[in-house]
């Protein structure tokens, strides 16, 4: 989706991942939204960066760590995942069909399960899957 850069106000794309996660071997996999992504397989990075080159591995002062973050194409400042994921109503934490419909969804073609180091939250995935606009 497009958000406004908190620093300069420029409209910028923001990316998040929606995926099934095997949280625990004994539990069925859950539909999760990933945040604070630390590692990604190269083909996934390539797929995303081809479309959104401003999605980059960056050092965050907030978390004092590096993760794949959305950066502003104009001023280069990072829009932290904390502000995109944490509170109900945040861009990647929709609480209604209207909010979820602001999101765009594309499927990354992968032929295998991948290992990703990241945080995740559950509960909004179904809503996003149902309401987000599909793009190629
Ligand atoms: Zn900016």
Image (cartoon, rainbow, N blue to C red):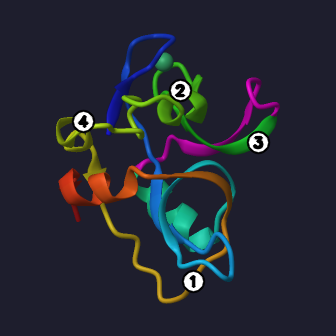
Q: Dots 4 and 1: beta carbons under 8 Å?
A: no
Residue 134 image offset from top left, x and y in percent: 20, 60
| Residue to which mark 2 is pinned | 83
Rendered image: mark on residue 66: 3
> Residue at image x 48%, y 32%?
84
Viewport quadrant of the N terminus: top left
Spatial separation of the CA atoms under disc 2 and disc 1? 29 Å
Confirm whether the magenta stretch covers residue 13: no
Magenta extent: 52-64
Real-space CA distance between mark 4 and mark 3, rounded to the nearest whole angstrom: 29 Å
* Circle 3/circle 1 CB separation < 8 Å: no
Relative depth, front residue between 101 and 51: 101
Q: Residue at x 26, y 50 (%)?
A: 104
- Depth check, mark 3 against mark 2: the one in front is 2
**Mark 3 or 1: the one toward you:** 1
As drawn, is 29 to the left or to the right of 25? Answer: left
The earlier-in-sequence mark between 2 and 1 is 2
Q: Mark 2: few, some, or many residues within 10 Å (few <14, many ≥20)?
A: few
Residue under label 1, please give it.
Answer: 113
Helix, strand or loop status at disc 4: helix
Task: For mark 3, give the secondary structure.
Answer: strand
Q: Between marks 4 and 2, how big is the CA–CA gap?
A: 16 Å
Q: CA distance from mark 3 to mark 1?
A: 24 Å
Q: Measured along the vertical axis of the image, is residue 109 above or below residue 92?
A: below
Q: Position of residue 56 (x, y in %)?
A: 60, 45
Label whose residue precedes the other's in the sequence (4 or 1) = 4
- 102 to 77, vertically: above or below: below
Across and down, in percent, residue 83 comes to 53, 26
Q: Tell me the residue that label 4 is attached to.
A: 99
């Amino acid at each position: 989706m497009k958000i406004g850069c908190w620093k300069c106000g420029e409209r910028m794309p923001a990316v998040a991942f929606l995926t099934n996660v095997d949280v625990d071997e004994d539990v069925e996999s859950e539909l999760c939204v990933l945040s604070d992504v630390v590692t990604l397989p190269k083909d996934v990075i390539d797929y995303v960066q081809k479309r959104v080159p401003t999605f980059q591995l960056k050092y965050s002062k907030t978390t004092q760590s590096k993760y794949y973050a959305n950066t502003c194409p104009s001023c280069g400042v990072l829009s932290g995942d904390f502000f995109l994921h944490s509170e109900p109503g945040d861009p990647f934490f929709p609480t209604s069909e209207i909010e979820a419909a602001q999101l765009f969804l594309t499927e990354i073609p992968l032929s295998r399960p991948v290992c990703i180091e990241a945080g995740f939250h559950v509960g909004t995935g179904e809503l996003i899957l149902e309401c987000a606009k599909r793009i190629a």
